[in-house]
Amino acid sequence: MVVDEFVYSILINGLCANGKMDSVFELLEEMDIKGIKAGPVTYNTVVNGLCKAGKTNQADKFSRTYFADNFTYSTLLHGYMKENDSQGVVETKRRLEQAGIPLDVVTANILIKAFFLVGMVNDACSLFQGMSEKGLAANSITYLTMVDGYWKHGMIDKALEFFEDYKKTPFVNAACHCRVIVGLCKEGKIEMATKLFLELSEKHLISSTTAYTTLMKFLFQNFNGEGVLRFITQIEHSDPERLSYVWNDALAFLCWRACFPAALETYILMRMKGLMVWSNSYYVLLKGLMKTRNGLIIKLLIGDYIKACGLFDPRLVNIICLHLCKKNVEDAVRFLSGMSRRSISLGALMVVVNTLKEKDRVQDALKFLFEAEENGLATDVFVYSIVVDGLCKEGFLEKALDLCTVMRKKGIIPNISTYNSVIHGLCCQGCFVEAFRIFDSLECSGLFPTIVTYATLIGALAGEGLLQDAKELLRRMVTKGIPPNTHIYNCLLNGYCRFGLLEEGLNLFRDMEMNSLLPDCFTISSLLGGYCIKGDMQGAFNFYNKYKNKGHSPDFLGYVNFIKELITKGRMEEARDIIRDMLCSGEAVDLINRAGQGLNFDPLATFLELACKDGRLEEVINILEDVRCKFFSSLCSKSNNSMKGVVKQRVVGSFIKDNEGKDCAIGSNNLKRSEAHTSISSCIGNNISTGEKENWKSKCTDTVMNKFILSQKLLRGDFETYYSIIASFCSKGELQKANGIVKAMSLNSGTAH
């Protein structure tokens, strides 16, 4: 086989593409030794390779060793543009003129672009104007280069002037229009850009998605989904295939922006116009609508999807599974049992398994997983990890560990998420030794603990009071190169505060701030709790105000605990201030109002605000306890239904004013114990008839009052209510009455025993 220049050129081109320039020069030497003369093609290949490698100066020197042509100079100009080297551009232009090589259109276009890139705008304009004198006719690339160059230099009017000249030429294409449309959008001239795009569509020149997707983006920013919908309905004069592209892209765009009403309207209009709806459009629309609760529309869309695309798309199977799981997971299981294995993806299995787990049916999830494997369906570590997590959370630790063994036997290696679930389950059961055995064995298994692993263990240790061990684990985590986050600090900080070690907690908090970590609501709540446990209410109040001014507040539980402690210490005005702050916190208000839903009652937060204004703090705190018990049941020892009592007041009782100007309800003397956990004013005002109330006011002595209160079945043995009564009297300065209640309570307690 005879090896000629052509073969060497191919080899040199390949080496240049891989950046092996040393080997390129070795081949050139070999060609010289063999007497094979290198021509312009070979030399230009070397120049191109050097420029792409960022060695344009070296390419320039090399180009001086042979007779360069237009391609050589164009390549050098590209290289200097890439390196933003204005001196190189000017020198290359000088060499080109000196060589006497007549310009072609390609070289002229590149030179114009180079001038604009290095800021030589006047030179670019002069070259364009002199092209006709050189016998060169500007083409669409020339105009695009001029328009783009002027636009990038902020000379919008000049760019539009060139664009108008370009529109009069016979070689109009989409590229220049797209550049101007994008530029107009960025300048905020949406209407002009829309008009220009419609002109383009009338000429059937929509060849790229850039123009209309950019327009959609800016229309959505200014007019939401309605603007996008109005835009696409204006596009009429285009072929159906191109229209389908635009409408499908618009539908997907609206779904990505979570504008589902407009997306659904787009879909309906597409069906009416007879435009093809792509499989992906069905998918993104259904996926978005699954977040809503409009089951009928989803059902109809699924029907259309099946008619258009069949049941062969695994994504459709996933959507149907998700839809069925929201209604009845049994239907999803039956649906999958009738499908072929090829149509069932891992995603569908995960949806069913996860739904069963979330419904506390992890045993059924395990059974379903094994049946799926028996039917030949592929599973992976993620599906197994969901089941392991569910077993651990429901307390089936042995089954979870057995399942990990089964996974290994099947060649499915548990990942760190699987082990994190097991470690969390062991910690919840107090099995710290076993949890740390697994933790210590992770690296031997080729796995490395994540921040979730450390957070689980640190939180568990701190919760049990093993604070030194938790701190040591934190130090070990840092030495492993894992920076602690706010959650990790919160776990340890909460432990210190719960066990009365406020100073250590504050030191840790300072470390946290030194590490540029911002506190969150849990951080503030923990430290407030620490101050309260220590009994330093002034310190707690000062800390609260300091971080409130910095924009940090406690969470709902933090607010409730702090308010209760302030009331305990008789600091009623401060407690009222904190209640008002809490009712300005979006998250707390949302939680309170959610607790009051379904009670045919005004927003519960509004009621609390009025009660606080009227000074009925015991009633407020009891209702807040109800809210806490509803959403944080593990923290409550018994049911408290003050909210129902409030509703009872509104529905049954007609409000009157007592001597102190507070609202009292009449006619609610039949409240059950669960409905009467309110303040002392509620107990007196809501559980006695009108006549009894008048007698009460005229002849109640302290002794009679004590006997009456303690004789009520609804209060017997209820320390929380005693506490609220005593606190109420203390806040009013009626210490004699408070002492009487304490004595009567003690006597009553002795009698009960």
Image (tube, rainbow, N blue to C red):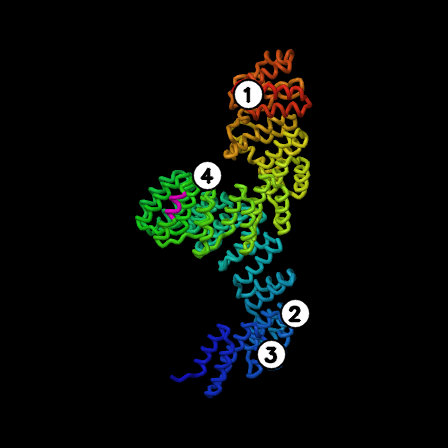
Of tags 3 and 1, the one toward the viewer is 1
Q: Amino acid at mark 1?
A: Ser
Image vertical order of residue 615 relative to residue 423, above or below: above
The residue beneath circle 2 is: 120
The numbered mark, 2 or 1, whose residue comes first in the sequence reads 2
Residue 749 marker:
1
Question: In the structure shown, which secondary structural element does the residue marked by tag 2 occupy?
Answer: loop
Q: Amino acid at mark 2?
A: Met
For the residues marked 3 and 4, what is the alpha-carbon distance in whole angstroms?
69 Å
For the residues marked 1 and 4, what is the alpha-carbon distance in whole angstroms?
54 Å
Q: Indicate the position of residue 191 as horizontal and vertical percent values.
A: 59, 52
Residue at 64%, 14% in the rendered image? 701
Of tags 1 and 4, the one toward the viewer is 1
The residue beneath circle 3 is: 96
Q: How many marks?
A: 4
For the residues marked 3 and 2, what is the alpha-carbon distance in whole angstroms?
17 Å
**Disc 3 + disc 4, Cβ < 8 Å:** no
The residue beneath circle 4 is: 293
Q: Amino acid at mark 4?
A: Arg
